[in-house]
Image (cartoon, rainbow, N blue to C red):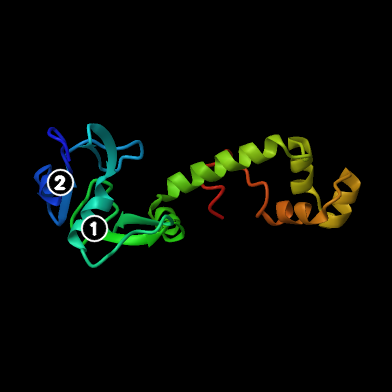
Amino acid sequence: MKKGDSILTLDRIVAKCEWDGDCLLWRGKVGPQGNPAATERIDGKDKYVAVRRRTFLGYHPEVVGIKSNERINTKCGNHACLAPDHLIKVTTRQQAKLTVERISEADKMNRARKISEKMRRHSVITPEMLEEIRRSTDGPYVTAKRLGIKNGSIVCRIMSGTGHKDYRATPFSGLL
């Protein structure tokens, strides 16, 4: 270690935090996703430090290391929280599941609308065909054949309301 080097220790991390209820909130810099971030100088070079990971390892010295597919997440869902009892080690799959659980219903609807719009740009089914399928009293496979659609199951999903939902009609259309 050279003169002028600074290593981010647990004491220095806690000094940049303040308690807010049960959460120990980071008041330093944050990374692109809003997670606590800092730099430390080693051998005259700045190095990025994932503060949550460093904090977790500081509070849990029995943990030897964190695998590449593991992340440190918070139980409370607050990105800035570094409270020892709120930090949990999760796999990337578990983290994705936690993220989905935390997304609000409005965000889910907005995401579904964006995905459906993107998929429709590449779809062989035109808006006129969609309207005709929705109004049709024939069976799905008869309707598919009449419209020249090879896959009758797509028409079946449209008729049952599970495929090609119209998220723009009303704010409640995707909920049924």
* In the foreground, 67 or 142: 67
Q: Which residue corresponds to the image point at 42% horizontal and 61% vertical from the top-left? A: 94
* In the foreground, 61 or 5: 5
Q: Earlier in the sequence, mark 2 or mark 1?
A: 2
Percent position of residue 87, x then y: 25, 58
Q: What secondary structure is marked by label 1?
A: helix
Q: Which residue corresponds to the image point at 18% horizontal and 60% vertical from the top-left? A: 59
At label 1, counting other C-alpha atoms closer than 10 Å, the crowd grade (few under 14, some 14-19, many 20 or more) is some
Percent position of residue 41, x then y: 21, 36
Instruction: Please name the residue that numbered disc 2 is placed on.
Output: 13
Q: Which residue corresponds to the image point at 13% horizontal and 32% vertical from the top-left? A: 4
Percent position of residue 175, x then y: 53, 53
Image quadrant of residue 91?
A: bottom left
Q: What secondary structure is marked by label 2?
A: helix
| Residue 97 against residue 126 in the figure, above or below | below
Instruction: Please name the residue that numbered disc 1 is placed on.
Output: 57
Residue at the bottom extreme, as displayed: 62
Residue 53 horizontal side relative to residue 113, left or right:
left
- The three-letter code of the residue at mark 1 reads Leu
- The three-letter code of the residue at mark 2 reads Ile
| Residue 143 against residue 84 in the figure, above or below | above
